[in-house]
Image (cartoon, rainbow, N blue to C red):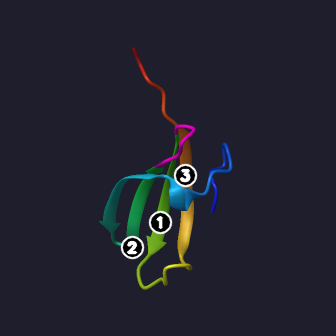
Amino acid sequence: MRCTECGWPLAETELVSIHRTSEGFVSYRRCMCGRITIQLREQGASANAGAHVVGTGSVQRLT
């Protein structure tokens, strides 16, 4: 999978946090371009299957 903003591989982005849910694991990753991607890896899924991007967004920095 790749970033929807710049195309950078999601596997090479910064892992911000990961949480267990009733459906599996939700991870938040920050791309080099600043976009946050939220992925859901369903329980029992193999390493290459079952991961779904469930949302993306840009981070705004307030000064």
* 55 vs 59: above or below: below
Tag 3 near tag 2, CB within 8 Å? no
Quickly name the residue at label 1. Answer: 40
Indicate the quadrant containing the C terminus: top left, top right, bottom left or bottom right: top left
In the drawing, does residue 19 fall left or right of residue 26?
Answer: left
Furthest-left residue in this view: 20
Query: CA separation, marks 1 and 2?
Result: 7 Å
Q: What main secondary structure does the magenta stretch of the protein show?
A: loop
- Residue at 67 percent of width and 44 percent of height: 6
> Which residue type does callout 1 highlight?
Leu
Secondary structure under tag 1 reads strand
Q: Is residue 47 above or below residue 60?
A: below
C-alpha span from label 3 to label 1: 9 Å
Question: Which numbered disc, 1 or 2, marks the residue that appears first in the sequence?
Answer: 2
Q: Position of residue 4 (x, y in %)?
A: 66, 49
Q: Residue 1: which quarter of the image? A: bottom right
Mark 2 packing: few (<14 Cα in 10 Å), some, or many (20+)? some
- Which amino acid, by three-letter code, is at mark 3? Gly
Which residue carries the number 3 mark?
Answer: 55
- Give how far across and how far down residue 56 sits, in percent: 56, 47
Residue 53 among magenta residues: no
Judging by the rendered image, the residue that carries numbered circle 2 is 24
